[in-house]
Image: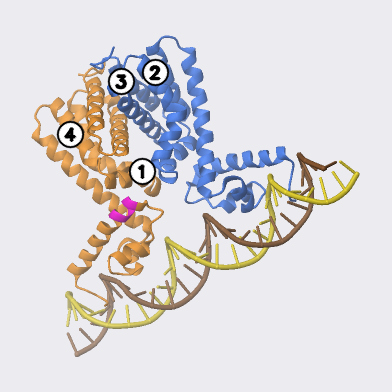
Chain colours: A blue, B orange, C yellow, D brown
DNA sequence: CCACTATACATACGCTATGTATGTCAGGAG
DNA sequence: CTCCTGACATACATAGCGTATGTATAGTGG
């Protein structure tokens, strides 16, 4: 059945991303064949290549989609808090909770840097999540000289916390510990020597 | 030329790991064909499969090799310092410097989690580098409840710092900033509420 | 309303690279 | 000296990506 309406085409593209996200999360990027994605979507690989150009292109679309979901959650939580320090804390904890889904973690934190390259991944992350962390740190008074370095390191700490948590598979004690440990690191920021 | 002496065979295995490390670091895991590794080593793929069983097996050997190198540097530096806090700091900074080689970073921090799986990677890291961080944190007085979580998060912070640094490609100002930011986070540990 | 073009796929094909099965030759234990 | 096993080489099967090509319809200009 060739050529559907424009809306149907957009729906096909959207559906493929959704299906691909599930498969990539379950089996990992390398173990997923585009045939699987296409078949699950009721189309052939031709459709996938038409919409996304390559396997990596499809994965990139999945990555961007998930990043946006996480970022949206983060922003909502941060907006609810008031005061720079509280926004930093609320945003960080919300990020940790939002990204701690096995599906998201596997794709965003494990496969993405290898598949689309660390630099590109960093850029996507910087545009969606890390900007907010950077901004919150700046408003919390972190000195400009350390702003980028601290943003990167805290981002890395939270990402690793998410992986650590998923590995402990929903153990509530672990989640509690992760959040308290994160608080310890965030507390440090408020004591940074050069802060203003 | 079939069948060399046992020593020659061990040398072949060692050489393949060395060559593979270079190629994986340059092009990334996916873009390296075993034919390239074998050819550069003066053997055929048969030799690679004989010694390492699979492409992932070879990569795993490379990973373990590099981990050990980093760990050795780390331990040497930590032993030179005295006092728990100083050992923590010395070890952490040494780790950051040791792992900040483009070759090491690409393999250990970007490809390894995706190729050999995060759990296996974590285990390798825990056995080589993270143990020492955990031990140093414990001696620095971190409460047992937060020990594992803080180890993971600080480890993640340092890994991301390394990626961030390599991306800035040897900019001395960036290196300085990374180390100072790391000090800020390490300082936090000494103020952890439950510490003893 | 009608030709026409670009879109949204499907189909067919080539190529690369992994893994495996099989062959081969020499070192070393007995 | 013999035999077996280790250290490879060679040959083959197969999966999966990408690309080239085909095709029918949805939109669009006249």
Label annotation for residue B110: 1
Task: Using the image, name the chain to which the residue with label 4 belongs.
Answer: B
**Which mark's residue is nearer the viewer, 2 or 4?**
2
Q: Which residue is mark 4?
A: B91
Task: Using the image, name the chain to which the residue with label 3 belongs.
Answer: A
Q: Which residue is mark 3?
A: A144
Q: Is residue B88 left or right of residue B144?
A: left
Residue visible at 28% across and 36% down? B165
Residue visible at 14% across and 35% down? B78
Magenta region: which residues?
Answer: B22-26
The quadrant in which the N terminus of chain B is found is bottom left
> On screen, C26 above or below D25?
below
Q: Please, what secondary structure does the residue beneath circle 4 have?
A: helix
> On screen, A108 above or below B5?
above
For marks 2 and 3, the one nearer the N-term is: 2
Q: Position of residue C28 (x, y in %)?
A: 17, 75
Q: Which residue is mark 2?
A: A136
Whole-number angstrom distance, CA of label 1 to CA of label 4: 22 Å
Mark 4 nearby-residue class (10 Å; few <14, some 14–19, many ≥20): many
Q: Are marks 2 and 1 in contact (CB under 8 Å)?
A: no
Task: Using the image, name the chain to which the residue with label 2 belongs.
Answer: A
């Amino acid at each position: 059945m060739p050529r559907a309406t424009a809306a149907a085409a957009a729906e096909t593209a959207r559906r493929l991303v959704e299906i691909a996200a599930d498969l990539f999360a379950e089996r990992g990027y390398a173990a997923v064949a585009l045939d699987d994605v296409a078949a699950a979507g009721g189309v052939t690989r031709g459709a996938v290549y038409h919409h996304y150009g390559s396997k990596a292109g499809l994965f990139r679309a999945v990555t961007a989609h998930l990043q946006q979901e996480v970022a949206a959650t983060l922003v909502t939580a941060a907006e609810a808090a008031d005061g720079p320090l509280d926004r930093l804390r609320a945003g960080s904890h919300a990020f940790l909770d939002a990204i701690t889904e096995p599906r998201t973690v596997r794709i965003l934190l494990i496969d993405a840097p290898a598949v689309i390259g660390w630099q590109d991944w960093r850029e996507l992350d910087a545009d969606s999540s890390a900007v907010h962390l950077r901004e919150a740190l700046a408003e919390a008074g972190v000195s400009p000289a350390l702003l980028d370095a601290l943003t990167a390191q805290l981002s890395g700490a939270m990402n690793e916390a998410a992986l650590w948590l998923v590995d402990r598979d929903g153990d509530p004690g672990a989640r509690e510990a992760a959040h308290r440990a994160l608080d310890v690191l965030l507390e440090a920021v408020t004591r940074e020597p050069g802060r203003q």
